[in-house]
Image (cartoon, rainbow, N blue to C red):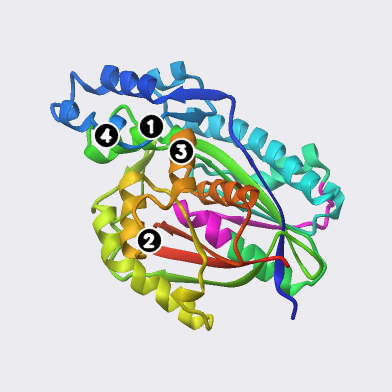
Amino acid sequence: MPMSNLVSLATAVPEHVLLQRDAAAIAEQVFSERYSDFGRLSRVFETTGISKRHSVCPVEWFLQPQGWPERTDAYLKGALKLFVTVVRKALEEAGLDVSEVDTVITVSSTGIATPSLEARAMGHMGFRPDVQRVPIFGLGCAGGVTGLAVASRLAQARPGSNVLLVTIELCTLAFRRDELTKANVIATALFGDGAAACVLRAGGEGIAAVEAAGEHTWPDTLDIMGWNVDTLGFGVIFARAIPPFVEENLAHAVSGILERAGLNREAIDRFICHPGGTKVVAAIERALSIDQGSLVDERAILNAYGNMSAPTVLFVLERAIRAGLPHRSLLSSLGPGFTASCVCLRRAA
């Protein structure tokens, strides 16, 4: 059975730019008089390693009370626009017409859409009526890597077919004025909006082959990361400190994933990681015995876009592809579960 090839990769962000200093000013306006710990926590805006982010809504939107209807409306409009933009870029790079797409996988955990986003985009894009639709919700920051693994398996199951993976996250829509918590302040300083899309096909040529994929979910870790859902929308869960958990546990999980694929750490020429935050990036470097400061592309993407959840690691991969991939790279991301997800890429000859 031929391996699946990554044929194209494209990224997109919404039009509104949110400078970190402006986000800090908004947070101070919203929280400082009501939350006594805000002064201490506000340093996070300076230590995240982020200079700007992108948002589907202008700054003024965040200063108004927002509930489920307003957040859902913003999600549907913003996500659909990003979907069309990023898919057209990915198909153009692959040299494909939209009618040649056989399967569409849509990964998103920051809004709820039924019918799902790819169904809403069909009239705008011109997908065939018989295109296979695979919407996936709930993967969070692990969605980019896990989505790539799912797309690879579906492409491999039908050699020659074109599988389109789309990851879209509008994290800024979860901004909460009412939650006076450390987790909410951190989320306000960290998250941005973005999308990535790629085409996979088993057989033929591509940028790189998906050589292996795997996941590791730790028991009793549901409280590390996720959403609380209430009448106003999503509320972020960071119940445990993620960096020390990563530093202590990631290496064993990655080694197990590689071992099951018949590989080892020494076979990996480069790690391409989801940059959840500066402290998480540093913890990954320590866990995987990578020289501190080596994950340059991860820090650059974090600085320019913030943590966009699922698409972020694909932004890092795009940057790595432009610079030139080594023989073998391992994509990794961490998400709710708490789960480590990995995909091994082997550069095309």
Query: In this figure, which residue is indicated by the disc labeled 4?
Result: 44
What is the span of residues highlighted in magenta in the rendered image? 127-147
Mark 4 secondary-structure assignment:
helix
Q: Amino acid at mark 3?
A: Cys
Q: Earlier in the sequence, mark 1 or mark 2?
A: 1
- Nearer the observer: mark 3 or 4; the answer is 4
Mark 2 secondary-structure assignment:
loop
- Left or right of 5 in this view: 333: left
Verify whether residue 299 appears in magenta.
Answer: no
Q: Amino acid at mark 2?
A: Ile
Mark 1 secondary-structure assignment:
loop
Residue 223 in the image: x percent, y percent? 28, 57
- Nearer the observer: mark 2 or 3; the answer is 2
Tags 1 and 3 touching, CB below 8 Å = no
Mark 3 secondary-structure assignment:
helix
- Nearer the observer: mark 4 or 2; the answer is 2
Query: In this figure, which residue is indicated by the disc labeled 2?
Result: 290
Cα distance, mark 4 to mark 2? 25 Å
Tags 1 and 2 touching, CB below 8 Å = no
Residue 333 in the image: x percent, y percent? 45, 58
Query: In this figure, which residue is indicated by the disc labeled 3?
Result: 171
Query: In this figure, which residue is indicated by the disc labeled 1?
Result: 175
Residue 88 in the image: x percent, y percent? 76, 41
Cα distance, mark 1 to mark 2? 34 Å
